[in-house]
Image (cartoon, helix red, strand yellow):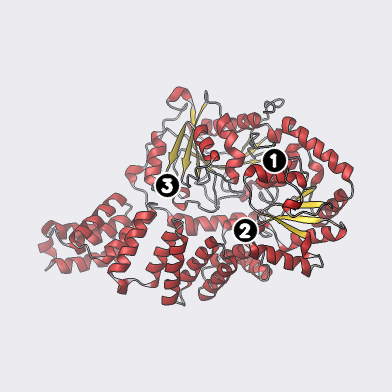
Amino acid sequence: MTLARHFASPAEALGYALTLHQDGRHADCGAVCRAILAVRPDHHGASFLLGVAAFALGRIEDSQRHLAITLALKPDLADAFFNLALLLRRRSRLAEAAALQARAIRLAPGQADAERIVTLGAMLRELGRIAEARAVHRRAVAQAPDGAEAWRESGHTLRDEGQLGAAAAAYGRAYRLDPSRTESLGDRLFAALSHCDWNTYDDLCRQILAVIDSGRGIALPLLTLMIDTSAAQQDRAARHFHRAVVQPAALPQAAAAVPAARPLGAPSGDGGRITVAYLSADFHEHATAYLAAELFELHDRDRFRVVACSYGPDDGSPMRRRLEAAFDAFLDIRGSDPDAVQARLAAEGVHILVDLKGYTRHVRFDLLARRLAPVQVAYLGYPGTMGSDVMDYVIGDRFVTPPEHQPHYRERLVILPDSYQANDRCRPLDAPVPDRAACGLPPDGFVFCAFNAPFKITPSMFGVWMRVLARVPGSVLWLQHSGRESADNLRREAARRGVDPDRLVFAPHRPQAEHLARYRLADLFLDSFPYTGHTTVSDALWMGLPVVTRMGGTFASRVAAGLLNAVGLPETVTTTSDDYEALAVRLAGEPAILVGFRHRLVAARATAPLFDSPRFTRHLERAYRTMWERHAAGLPPQSFTVPPLGPPLGPPL
């Protein structure tokens, strides 16, 4: 394009380019901007708009370069700082993005509307700079008290500070200001559940179910696991969430960043080994690590090469050091954008990517929204469907993902023998058992234990627990301590149900070995419903503590039932609240049965499939090989069942 032939001046041309950009004609906009720059290389407006158009076209490197040139030409152009900050945020370079956003606000406070201030607060929160984020969000709320997003982000920061009641109130205000943002309903309910405030529970559940069933609005997938939903409703919510939230959050994919298709056939290089990469933010002291550490160590290195792809913090813990040693390569991808992650995975020759997060906290939507490896698998971190065919498979077993549940998954089901859950036989058993009094327990009396997170406690299940206490004189309920708000609310709810609040005892956080030792003081573990225990139940069984659970119709509501079957204690699985209550009361009155259960669980450490980590690892490797062989043959993903191996493989450690 020759500028003089079409426009009277660069200013006129820039106006036309802006119109093209607003009409979505980004390539044409870029062509006009380049024509302007051909005659006026120092035209910062053309350089700026070219950077914006390049981003819209997915040319991320070009966009960043043009925005940088713009700032070199006009260092005080706040809009260029704002756009570059947003670009860097999408590339997961949060520290740089926050610095640029703050600088832009200082340069042009008059242009710093509440939305831009809220964005800065969100960046700071994502960086873990909570106090700074809180101050920024206070400013945003003061500037735009009717801004729903300011209140929602303020709620996120309050939640991260542990001010759950205030967070729930902020989410409630956000929803009232903008009822179209239905995710605020889920935010509010999650905050309320997290500190056991059930005053609005029924109403919020009704509204969220209406959102799911109508398809009008967003329901947070993780939240759907915590309330009474069907597998079909969870699937519907996850699919809509992926379309409405995950896909739009994805960074436009540069064509040059997409690796060439891997040749079909046997895995290439490294002696024909399959390279499996595990993606997570939890390679440190975390429940996922407690379960899976030995799995990573036990992979057959003659057949598999194992890579960690970590975007979480290095907490400097012994668990972190153990995990770093467990992998053939440990990639720290914090601050890396999807193109860079994809390039690193390609350089490692990754065949199968296993996501260990799903729709849980600290998930990176920009990574979930695209294909980073030829075969992608959802496993362990999220007990449900992702609602997206970006994940080819989900790992389950005949309890958590029976074949008849396939219609409720976009992923193909992989049915492992025994249990889907990895377990670590290195969990400590020899820590000193604490004194009952030191734990706040009475010198005698039956101890029911319910160490699941507070957000898993529903009013109906708490009601069952209170009826159990009422029917077992002198008994206490031992709960996880998650702050004064939740403890006060639970005591209040106990009193409302006619139970002395002093019969609730709260266990503060302790290091893993000390925490596991506490299980020996309990007599019976009472599981939550519909989101049953995962690591907590596994820990209880490992420590020889029997568990009563209720099995439902969804993945999350069937995990504990599957674990109990795999450990050889199916007698403690129930299917109704009445049966659950009756069994808990009966076992409290029949100590001989409980002693027998304990003996069986102690023996199960060496004999049960649940704790046979070598056997589990070989089963999972069979699954990976089947997935890869289908891909190598040019076949689409397909559900399959992994045949069981013979007798247990793993002698006790």
- Residue at horizontal 37%, vertical 67%? 116
Question: How far apart in space, not on screen, are marks 1 and 2 (Cα)?
Answer: 22 Å
Residue 91 drawn at (x, y percent): 37, 52
**Mark with earlier residue (1, 2):** 2
Q: Amino acid at mark 3?
A: Arg
Q: Amino acid at mark 2?
A: Thr
User: Mark 1 belongs to which amino acid?
Assistant: Arg
What secondary structure is found at the residue carrying circle 3? loop
Q: Is residue 398 above or below residue 109?
A: above
Give SS at disc 2.
Answer: helix
Number of the label disc, if any, that sits on residue 398: 1
Is 444 in front, or is 224?
444
Image coordinates for residue 243, horizontal then vertical, percent? 49, 57
Comparing labels 1 and 2, the label whose residue is closer to the camera: 2
Residues packed near mark 2 inside 10 Å, few (<14), some (14 to 19) or many (20 plus): many
Q: Residues within 10 Å of mark 3 (few under 14, many from 20)?
A: some
Q: Tell me which label, 2 or 3, sits earlier in the chain.
A: 2
Q: Tally the marks.
A: 3
**Which dot, 2 or 3, sits closer to the camera?**
3
Q: Position of residue 485 (x, y in %)?
A: 64, 65
Disc 3 to disc 1, how far (Cα)? 36 Å
x 55%, y 39%: residue: 319
Residue closest to the eye, 148 or 285:
285
* Label 3 sits on residue: 334
Which of the numbered marks, if any, corresponds to residue 314? none
| Of callouts 3 and 1, the N-terminal one | 3
* Rendered-image quadrant of the C terminus: top right
Q: Is residue 276 visible?
A: no
Query: Which residue in the structure is indicated by mark 2?
Result: 224
Q: Residue at x 59, y 64 (%)?
A: 191
